[in-house]
Image (cartoon, coloured by chain):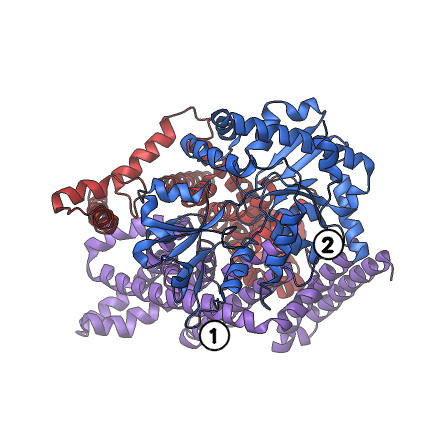
Chain colours: A purple, B red, C blue
Amino acid sequence: MSNALILLMGFGFWGAAWGLNIAVAGSAFGRTRTGRIFMPLLFGLTLLVLWEALVRALGVPPVILPAPSAIAAKFASSTDVLWADFVQTAVKGALSGFVIGCSAAFVTAILCDRVPFLRAGLLPIGNFVAALPIVGLAPILVMWFGFGWQSKAAVVVAMVFFPMLINVVAGLQASERMQRDLMATWGASYTQALWKLRLPAAMPFIFNGLKISASLALIGAIVAEYFGSPVVGMGFRISTAVGVLNIELVWAEIAVAALAGSALYGVIAIVERGVTFWHPSQRG
Amino acid sequence: MRRVGPIFAVLAALLALWYLAAIWMNATWVYDQAQRSGVEVTLAELIPAAMAQDRPLLPPPHQVAAKLWEGVTAQAITSKRSLIYHGFITFRGTMAGFALGILLGVGLAMAIVRFRVVDKSVMPWAIISQTIPIVAIAPMILVVANQLGIQGREVPKAIIASYLSFFPVLVSMVKGLRAPDQMQLDLLKTWGASEGETFRKLRLPASMPYFFASLKVAVAAALVGTIVGELPTGAVEGLGARMLLGSQYGEPLITWAALFASAILAGALILAVGLVERLAAVKMGVRA
Amino acid sequence: MKRILTAGLMAAMASSASAEDVTLQLKWVTQAQFAGYYVAKDKGFYDEEGLNVTIKPGGPDIAPEQVIASGQADVITTWMSPGLAARERGVPLVNIAQPYKGQGLQLTCLKEMGVETTADFADKTLGVWFFGNEYPFYAWMAKLGLATDGSAGGVTVLKQAFNVDALLQKQAACISVMTYNEYGQVLDAGITPDQLVTFTYREEGVTVLEDGLYVMEERLEDPAFQETMVKFVRASMKGWKYAEANPDEAAQIVIDNDDSGAQSLEHQQYMMGEVAKLTATGNGALDPADYEATVAALLAAVSPDNPAITKTPEGMAWTHAITDKALAE
């Protein structure tokens, strides 16, 4: 097949898929659940087809940018390596750090809530630190906590703590004065008011913090592996496979990272829907 | 004074904690070295020894401050040893990524609000894109950009930075452009306003507060993206590269100084954007 | 495959429109390890040959093999192990010169962690560099019969960062060092040589050639490119010999070329002194016996998950065509 033909077919597929998506978006099917999933899927598929066509037609060397089909083949043939890396980085490093960091932030937020002095002092600092490139701490934390997954978890904790903290603190302020006064007139204790009113009211903020932290967690765990790791892990593989020109494996790891990140985000979104069904943003 | 008091108290507590941690963490090395040469160290000898190491595990604050000061003042700001020079490289990358991110975010938001099909098929991917760790793709972006004939690191770095900074702009702008309610939209329709006019006279002004609110997040994200772009992609200039090189050459003080320089840069950027936001609010008639 | 390679070749040609422009991609950051090239540039040796040489520093995440395959460099410095690995993966690199006769790679261990001989490696943690630099280590472990998968009686492998912290913090019993760089960092940190046990790869019977100059095979068919490379190698070797004779000046030249501004002059002077020991014993021509020894060492350690090469390299992995002309007076 000539290169021009491949290219033409790639763009042809793009046009056809886009046309189909426009049709679906305007139709009744587009409003069903399946339709809402179908459209982004088709769009994603289009990007892959276009990528494949460009790589093939232009003869891009596989050591520069491999075709999606080659990446998929690599993915299928090295699932054991990918799984071991996933467990090491995503589960041991990112997830444990995520849980520790978010819990610590939660406890600190409650403390801030009880001690107004602490809130006045810590919150502006937290706001500032949340905007900092904490990821630069990675080489230092790897030096402190060793090469195992513990140092990766430590980087993740450092990265998620402050974004989570400011979200929870903001959330705890979210209930209205009148509602809080009402709780007080009913003689509710601090814990009762917290459980029955303020935590539920804070949920949208808490989930927002969790979502931000979820994507930060994977970044942190992967970057930390650049600065020393055992011979397993997604960051290890990404940073070393390039050196031996195993570019397909790098992209396969990127795919795993994308899947893991999206899955974590998806789980949080689903739990959020269950917990904050009452909130306006979840209606309609 | 009531507002800054607690902040200073917490900062002072952190500083004290830092000093204690520095003594505690750097002590191991002092003890190891003493044992290797077969001498005893007392506590009085330990503290100064832990405060003035060449490659401390945790440098005490004054050591970092000294290094930072040296990096800023000890040479001409055009020197490659100057932190100002490297800070400027990072600042330039951040601004390029910030601008690209704004363009991308606003453009995509306009398309999403205007075309249902874009909303339905592209918006989910915009969310997914943020769950993909950018660090994994950063070196690949560099290689592909090189292959396309783009020399240097400026463009790939800006792409990496905009990858992170476009998202907050996008989300806020979609919300903002949809902020006018049906009644207002209907009113414009009865006046016979065209789509372009509705956009210019109603949707765009309505979205401005949302837009400016997103800028602070976006500029911080652009800085993080720039530093990530400088960390593992073989860059030799910029604060991110300094962090990496400090670790590479076994000079942790360089890393710490770069870390604090980037914190200062972040603070300055956020302040500047906040100022722009306030100016814009005043100009648009909001009483601040 | 053929078409892909031609495309790569065309890209390579496009990047060097003028025949006398040469782009050199280094394997690592600007340091005295590459002093010869910087000296040749700054002392005008390249200019004398009518060459306009651009030196691109490397770093973590930069694979010179990938850079040259994408046509972004005309010639690269790399170790022979990743060079041969690239050849087997469809990037036919040819060694045209070998300024480094000696081997700087070592494994250095803290005595207090209980390592005196190779027999003590069992159940210890050893730091290794990856990114194509791990092959000599795996070849050596295979020779010693030590498992590297972390099983009992074997060794635990650690991907060490680019510094010596792993040893100083006692996270590893031994770490990889180059004689001219990290070993000096260990000493600088306050450890004395008698507190260390150091194993040299060559003495342990693992010969793997380090920094050589490599180009793409197809381009060597072009006589004009050959001529350019002859000039390049001649000027580069002149630079190396000058650097060996004037180490302090060479170190200063390296510092002048360091864009990061993080290298210190003292360390570069130390590095230049050590590097000279590795380059001074050779004249830049590859010794075929060293090549054979490298191939043998790599083939001895074919592991299923991490092979450098799985068979004897095919085709022209090295040539004397350039050095024969460049070094003839």
Does residue A206 appear in the picture of this structure? no
User: Residue at coordinates 83% horizontally, 59% vertically from top-left?
Assistant: A8
User: Residue at coordinates 39% horizontally, 65% vertically from top-left?
Assistant: A98
The front one of B80 and B176 is B80
User: Residue at coordinates 60% horizontally, 49% vertically from top-left?
Assistant: C63
Q: Mark 2 — on which chain does it sit?
A: A
The front one of B137 and C134 is C134
Q: Which residue is mark 2?
A: A61
Q: Which residue is mark 1?
A: A270
- Residue B192's label in the rendered image is none
Mark 2 vs mark 1, foreground winner is: 2
Amino acid type, residue under disc 1 in the picture:
Ile
The quadrant of the picture occupied by the C terminus of chain C is top right
User: Residue at coordinates 39% horizontally, 59% vertically from top-left?
Assistant: A147
Residue C271: x %, y % from top left: 46, 36
Q: Is residue B198 above or below residue C272?
A: below
Residue A26: x %, y % from top left: 70, 69
Does residue B25 appear in the picture of this structure? yes
The front one of B105 and B85 is B85
Number of on-image labels = 2
Q: Secondary structure at mark 1?
A: helix
Q: Is residue B259 above or below residue C263?
A: below
The quadrant of the picture occupied by the N terminus of chain C is bottom right
Residue B235: x %, y % from top left: 53, 42
